[in-house]
Amino acid sequence: MELAILLLISAIVIFPLVLWVRHERRVAARRTAARDAAMARELQELRGVLHDAGVPEHELPSADPAQLHVVRMQVQGLLHSIRLDDGDAPVRTEPLPSAPHGEMPRGIWGAGADLYVAGYQYTGDDGEDTGTIYHRLPDGSWRVEWQTEARLFGSIWGSGLDNIYAVGGSCARFDGRAWREETIEGLGGGYLLAVWGSSPLDVYVSTGDGRIFRSRGDGRWQLEASLGCALHTLGGWGDQAVWAAGNEGRVFRRRAAGEWVPEESGTRAQLVSFFAASPEEAYLAGGEHLLRSRGDGSWQPVDGAPAWTRRVTGTPEGEIFVGGPLARLQAGRWEPIPLEGSIDGLWCDGRVLHVLGDRTTQLD
């Protein structure tokens, strides 16, 4: 009798425990599968972003989560400033205001002694990070001027200190008093890759699916073109010459009537950076290519340019700077500029070359 009672009690206690263990194992298996599926999706998105940025196929991370070795890293944004009128002056390097989990600077623009940097700060959690605008004041101090959740910024441009745009997950505008987001009707879930304007009354943004929107500076945007490829960069020389370029080496120039006409680049690389010294001298950088146009509708490789270029800027006097490794084209000759670390953006005010970069530290 006692044995029967013990067996009954054991069954009452153990059987539910077995069921609970099996249930927890199934839940854990589903969580693992969901985590692996989410990681696989994130890896595919990362591969797409890196591919669009010009990273060769053989350098892309594996799409299989099981083949990855996860290493915790922290990124510190840096600004390097190089005096152009004094070749012996040391490079001045200063950190951006740091975030607990690191930050990623993506674009730079300036006016006089004021510099603005657009990027984002890592939150350390799943989901989108925090879009951030940094401002270096004329006295050399830095401040985080504006932040918005889940709105990464990748490009910044202004016509003056009272009219600055930053774009990425949204379009933000500074009117000299405050930053505010502007709604672009019809954008939907599109991601903004670039912003540029010829004046405060003539501003353009481009998207990852190949659309170009235009604003007259009144806060309203109109769709002007759908060009069928990710457009990573915009630029021009006043309203006389405006270009857009992006994936597969595709380049477009705007005509006066608002038509965007394709131009022959001779490459299928992702073109990601633009600079115009005049309507007859424009440059595009992307991967293994630095291209130049004389304004005649065709683009040719620049002789002697570094083998890998990701950014390009210059001065109206004809000096050209590229970032890949950092180098300077002066009087027809390329000169390397020693600088460690990656290059995320270039801005030149004629006297000082500002190089936006970052430093990565392994945490474990």
Image (cartoon, rainbow, N blue to C red):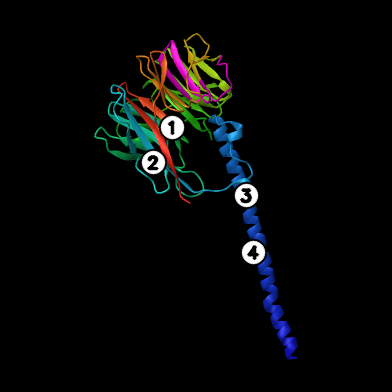
Residue holding disc 1: 344
| Horizontal and vertical percent position of residue 172 | 40, 33
Q: Is residue 296 left or right of residue 333?
A: right
Q: Which mark's residue is nearer the viewer, 1 or 3? A: 1
| Horizontal and vertical percent position of residue 343 | 43, 32
The part of the image, by quadrant, that contains residue 57 is top right
Identity, as a three-letter code, of the amino acid under mark 3:
Asp
Task: Measure the alpha-carbon separation of dots 2 and 4.
Answer: 41 Å
Q: Label 1 crowding class (10 Å Cα cut-off): few <14, some 14-19, many 20+?
A: many
Task: Measure the alpha-carbon separation of dots 2 and 1.
Answer: 20 Å
Q: Secondary structure beneath disc 1? A: strand
Q: Nearer the viewer, residue 42 or 360?
A: 360
Q: Which mark's residue is nearer the viewer, 2 or 1? A: 1
Q: Secondary structure beneath disc 4? A: helix
Is 99 one of the magenta-colored residues? no
Residue 156 visible in the snapshot: no
- Per the rendered image, the range of residues in magenta is 264-289
| Horizontal and vertical percent position of residue 301 | 52, 16
Q: Nearer the viewer, residue 218 or 166?
A: 166
Q: Which mark's residue is nearer the viewer, 2 or 3? A: 3
Q: Secondary structure beneath disc 2? A: strand
- Most extreme residue toward the left is 139
Q: Secondary structure beneath disc 3? A: helix
Residue holding disc 4: 24
- Proximity of marks 3 and 4: CB atoms separated by less than 8 Å: no
